Amino acid sequence: MIIKTSGIVIFEQTILEKDKLLTILTKKEGLIRAFAKGAKNFLRCNSSAFSLFCYSDFILYKTKNSYNLGEACSIKYFFDLRYNLEKLSLAEYFCELIINLSVQPQESNKILRLMLNSLHFLLEETLDKSILKSIFEIRILCASGYSPNLCCCKKCLSRKDDGFYLVSIEGCIYCKKCLYTTKNRFIELSRGTLLALRHIVSSSLEKAFYFSLSEENKRNFCKTCEEYTISCIEKKINTLVFYKQICKI
Ligand SMILES: [Zn+2]
């Protein structure tokens, strides 16, 4: 069966020197792994259309157990990320999150648009990198079924704007009065953090990247997003460890 789809290569492995196994986040098919047989010969003909961080139109041949790459035609390159280790390591962290959160075909386009927008902001440096990282974390978790319930206290349903604590493992918030009812680890949310989180969770993708946050709130916000991500992924995220070493966070 022939499949035509656009997508971005988020991981590549060389196999037996000549072949490549590509992990592609596609528009409609979810996350797929496709063999590019004789990839070195391919590269001469098709430039870099199926290299890491290239967004391309693909023609794939679907067999019983795998996909084989037929053609690739590039739409947009994000190769310049490679010239900055901090940007590259953050982009690789985005890729690892996508791979870890098994992308369902129905959410595929949403996650692809999130990735393309995030790489654009990363390349153009139009957004603070730590804020961008946090937005990506929350949006991909929401698209993968880990949307936190931030509207009110889980116990008493209080809907104030401050005085809340996020219990990551439960994916919900508690007010100060009710916090004693949970034994799970919690993180105190500043008012700015809670409002920013609510904005990211409930806005359209285009609007999700735009909000203001004071320097004082930024720290609490980024820490909260990262802790929530680690709690949802439930395993060591190597690219996150590397990114933090690079940034000396
Ligand atoms: Zn309460």
Image (cartoon, rainbow, N blue to C red):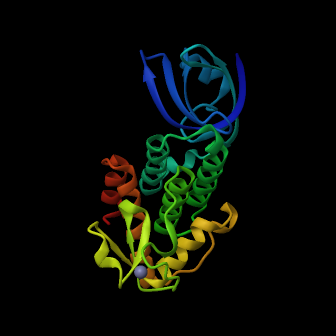
Can see residue 73?
Answer: no
Q: Nearer the viewer, residue 116 or 190?
A: 190
Where residue 20 appears, x then y in whole percent?
A: 50, 22
Where residue 163 appears, x then y in whole percent?
A: 41, 85
Can see residue 139?
Answer: yes
- Residue at image coords 53%, 64%: 135
- Residue at image coords 26%, 68%: 183
Task: Please give left or right for residue 88 compared with residue 50 in the image.
Answer: left
> Which quarter shows the N terminus?
top right
Residue 49, compared with residue 171, is above or below; it is above
Task: Please give left or right for residue 242 compared with residue 38 in the image.
Answer: left
Farthest-out residue, front = 156
Task: Please give left or right for residue 180 compared with residue 114 in the image.
Answer: left
Where residue 84 appears, x then y in whole percent?
A: 46, 54
Where residue 9 appears, x then y in whole percent?
A: 56, 36
Residue 40, compared with residue 122, is above or below; it is above
Farthest-out residue, left = 183
> Which quarter shows the C terminus?
bottom left
Q: Nearer the viewer, residue 170 or 43?
A: 170
